[in-house]
Amino acid sequence: MAADPPEMEQGAREAIEVLARADTGRLLGTLLRDTRDFQLAEDCLQEAMESALVHWTRNGLPASPAGWVLQTARRKAIDRFRRARNFDRKREEYGLLIELDQQAMDSHEAPAIPDERLRLIFTCCHPALDAKTRIALTLRTLCGLTTREIARAFLDTPETMAQRLVRARHKITKAGIPFEIPEPEQWAERLNSVLSVIYLTFNEGYSATAGTSSLRHDLCLEAIRMGRLMLELVPGDAECEGLLALMLLNHSREQARFGLQGEMIALDQQDRSRWHQGDIEQGCRLLDHALGRGQPGLFQLQAAISALHAQAPSHDATDWRQIVLLYDAMHAIAQNPVYLLNRAVALSYMTGAEAALAALDTVETALADYQPFHAARADFLRRLGQIDAARVSYRRAIELSGNESERYFLQARMEIMGDDTQGRRLASSAPQSCDR
Amino acid sequence: MKYLALIYAAPGAGPDYGTPEFGPYMDGYRKATETYQRDGVMLAGEALQDTSTATTVRVRNGKTETMDGPFAETKEQLGGFYMFDCANLDEAIKYAAMIPSAEHGSVEIRPVMEIE
């Protein structure tokens, strides 16, 4: 007996949602290999999903939903090629599609879906695309997020995001951005571009404040999912392992980073019993593997710093000396004033705020408009009892701050100092960290 | 695919004629061009006279108007070009990066429109 229609439609809808999240990357990768046309592949996949809703509502789910969608999408592509003005140039792809369709019909089995996700992610993260576009495109094609969801995560309108994605696909096709695994001479740089996209995605979610769209927080989970996928596709790569370790270690603090009112809680004030031990163990294990490979890199070093925090019984008992050395190592690989700023913060806990304040001089010009620089300086000054100077730096930090929760945090830090006398008393209490 | 590599540089940014650096700079161009020819990717490539020799032409209401100088007054000026025939953008980027002026100026890569 057939289920009643509303139930059938509900079942079909759910199956398509699951498929979109789990299989978009594989399906799109395969279609892209077959058609060599990014826009066409996405359009055909979209149409096949819409067609699935109609057919599955009427006939129930096929044995292999993903196989059904792939075959349908290929037929949509065949139709489009037949109608296309540039048919001659697409003859090769057309021939391949016809052949694949014939094979599927002959075998009476669902078509196999080869894994082309690595090529797909290298295409989406190509350095010839703008950084934000790389993230959006990767979320759309590899993670199967809808344009609406990505727009919400970026606080953009769906129309703006849709335009961005259309422009990106257009550029990929027209500029000849390849759907290939990079050549050995470009491998390291291109892999780094992919890993950076994943880490930027994670940070988009991580920098979201409590109370903002939960989709932003989901970005962290999407990034971790992509990190796992990369490790599956490029097994044994030390930086892939380092990145996943870094994300897991940072994510372990997720529950402890915000208070009941959504206010940010700094590392030194967090309830460490709320840190997720499973994430920490997994992160540390991955990091050990990575470090054992003897190919140091920035993600591994950052993960090592995060691991030292994760393993410290308290803020005071953290191995700050080791953290200072790790920032030195990062700066040796890639000169960056932000590493020196973070090093100064670690130094302030190792030897004191006076040395840390002096260390800021070297980066002052480079980081004049960087909020964490002023927040760190304010903190050092506060700890040295120089309350008036601290207040000036707090005000500058608040001015430069990008979100409400951070502003609230800095404001509270500034107000708690009160006047100079009160400030001196407070100067000996637990210090602020610009680590999160 | 065909790609046009447009070479831009600010006047005076590169080595000047008569300085010791000028010889190696021109050698760089010679070597790059040899590589392009050896790999069979070069369709064309020329250096241009400087922008003080440029004339801009517009036709408005059927009347030809000429102006002394380049179309846009920008800091970086078009100084030359290559036309490549490459498999994809990665290949075009690889060859464009060999252009010596890329070290002080910039090279814009534009795919050539294929008329269907």
Image (cartoon, rainbow, N blue to C red):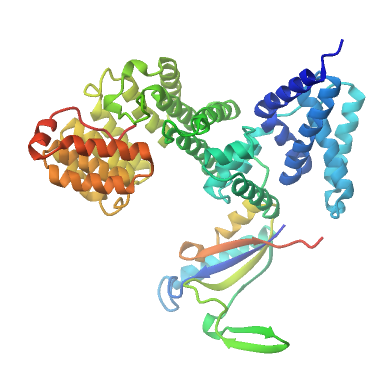
Give the position of the N terminus of chain B as an image quadrant. Answer: bottom right
Q: Residue at x 69, y 28 (%)?
A: A23
Q: Position of residue A136 (x, y in %)?
A: 58, 41
Q: Position of residue A182 (x, y in %)?
A: 61, 42
Q: Position of residue B38 (x, y in %)?
A: 67, 60
Q: Residue at x 57, y 83 (%)?
A: B54
User: How many numbered discs?
Assistant: 0
- Residue A276 in view of the camera: yes
Give the position of the C terminus of chain B as an image quadrant. Answer: bottom right
Horizontally, residue A167 falls left or right of residue A252, namely right
Location of residue A186 with respect to B74 vertically, above or below: above
> Residue farthest to the left?
A421
Residue A383, quarter of the rendered image? top left
Horizontally, residue A330 falls left or right of residue B6, namely left
Location of residue B52 with respect to B92 vertically, above or below: below
Most foreground residue, A311 or A267: A267
Horizontally, residue B43 falls left or right of residue A435, namely right
Q: Residue at x 58, y 38 (%)?
A: A150
- Residue A182 in view of the camera: no
Q: Residue at x 7, y 37 (%)?
A: A421
Horizontally, residue A335 falls left or right of residue A162, namely left
Residue A284, quarter of the rendered image? top left
Q: Position of residue A190 (x, y in %)?
A: 55, 43
